[in-house]
Image (cartoon, rainbow, N blue to C red):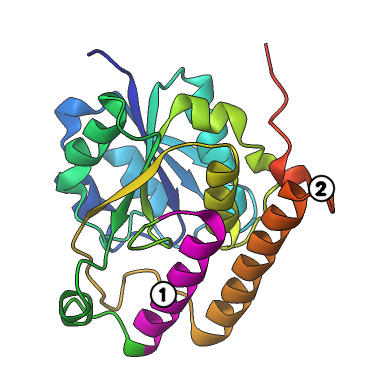
Amino acid sequence: MGRKLVVVMPAYNAEATLERTWQDLPRDAVDDIILVDDASRDRTVEIAQRLGLTVIRHAENRGYGANQKTCYRAALEREAEIVAMIHPDYQYDARLLPLLVGFVEHGICDVVLGSRIRSRAEALAGGMPPWKYLANRLLTLVENLALGQNLGDFHSGFRVYRRAVLETIPFEANSDDFVFDSEFLAQAAYFGFRIGDAPVPARYFAEASSINFRRSVVYGLGTLRALLQSRAHRAGLIRSPLFSPRPKTG
């Protein structure tokens, strides 16, 4: 089954890890790799250009969610049939990309997440801080209940999407901050897309991107708000732009 696979990387100060992430990608299976740089203060752009990636630069720092918006617009413009998003911080094992893509390519899922939590022992042995593990478990439980899913990790930075998902979800209305990810999955569930996950080992180390405790609390509250908006919109109590189909273009 032929398909055009585009990998997108939302990057910010990733000079220490970008090349290692790129080396792990099975590049013979990828048609294009787009790196969107969110006004990094290091050599991220220089390294990306040396590696031959397609580079898009933000003149000023816009935030993680805004970075993903640029990523997905660029992938759709390049006529991607499948889009994979992976953080260039070497936290996820990019060698597993073809396996995740296979679930989409063979029509089993529309959205596939790389789950960092196959077991508690494995996640903690990989370096996930205990407080982050606990927060992930609690939020994931609430999200599964609210959205009717059965996922192991709602908060992964390794994701694969079928093109129709990005053409349907109004992601431009989402937050420009980290809660973009939670809003996107709430939208995917609302629009009836099939969401699945597969175990992907994760590494936690100094250069791997991770938000601090305060930002995590803000993220958690934003996730709960997205779930409430989804339920209220579905019940007809509010009309949220997050859950109105993306306008058709072209």
Residue 86 in view:
no
Q: Quadrant of the C terminus?
A: top right
Q: Amino acid at mark 1?
A: Asn
Left or right, residue 199 beside residue 181 = left
Secondary structure beneath dot 2 equals loop
Which residue is the site of mark 2? 236
Q: Tell me the quarter of the picture where residue 199 sits.
A: bottom left
For the residues labelled 2 and 1, the Cα–Cα distance comes to 29 Å
* Front-lying residue, 93 or 144: 144
Find residue 86 and report its horizontal and vertical position in percent.
35, 49
Q: Residue 180 bears which disc, if any? A: none
| Image position of 151 with respect to 98: above or below | below
Question: Which SS does the magenta portion mostly show?
Answer: helix
Which corner quadrant holds the N terminus?
Answer: top left
Mark 2 neighbour density, 10 Å: few (under 14) some (14–19) many (20 or more): few
**Residue ID at (15%, 46%):** 95
Mark 2 or 1: the one toward you? 2
- Residue 116 horizontal side relative to residue 226, left or right: left
x, y percent for residue 49:
35, 39
Which residue sits at x=67%, y=37%?
Answer: 170
- Check if mark 2's residue and mark 1's residue have beta carbons within 8 Å: no
- The residue at 57%/74% (across/down) is 220
Q: Is residue 126 left or right of residue 243?
A: left
Q: Is residue 127 visible?
A: yes
Q: Which mark is residue 136?
A: 1
Sequence-wise, the earlier of marks 2 and 1 is 1
Segment colored magenta: 131-149
